[in-house]
Amino acid sequence: MLIGTLKLTFHLPWANSLKDKRMMVKSICVKLRNKFAVSAAEVESQDVYRTAVIGVAYVASSTAQIDSVLDHLIAWLENSCEAELVEIQRDI
């Protein structure tokens, strides 16, 4: 069993409150769970309304499968997310 993790840092220039930020974070986490069958949650900077840090975990039996899912997930976020993805930390 292998576990792949991502720590994704987003910049939200349009967010004017924590409510704006939490709506976006919740939406992203639900979409990631449904589309990619990963575990996702906000892990840092909960009180900073223009920065969101989301942790993602995926369990599989091979490194190739983890790499494939995480690559597709990152590409999807870069193309369809309102927030700007500014940093990615990846670990297997």
Image: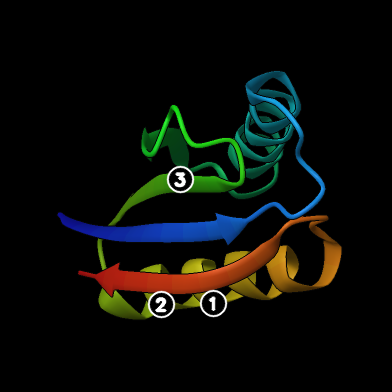
Residue 57, x across and y down, in percent: 34, 48
* Count of number-bearing discs: 3
Find residue 15 and report its image quarter: top right
Q: Is residue 5 left or right of 92 when viewed as pictured?
A: right
Q: Is residue 77 above or below residue 49?
A: below
Q: Is residue 50 above or below residue 33?
A: below
3 and 2 marks in contact (CB < 8 Å): no
Q: Amino acid at mark 1?
A: Asp
Q: Earlier in the sequence, mark 3 or mark 1?
A: 3
**What residue is drawn where x is 46% and y is 59%?**
8
Residue 67, numbered label: 2
Q: Amino acid at mark 2?
A: Asp
For the residues bearing labels 1 and 2, Cβ distance under 8 angstroms: yes
Q: Nearer the viewer, residue 65 or 49?
A: 49
What residue is pinned by disc 1? Answer: 71
Q: Residue at x 44, y 27 (%)?
A: 47
Left-right relation of 33 to 27:
left
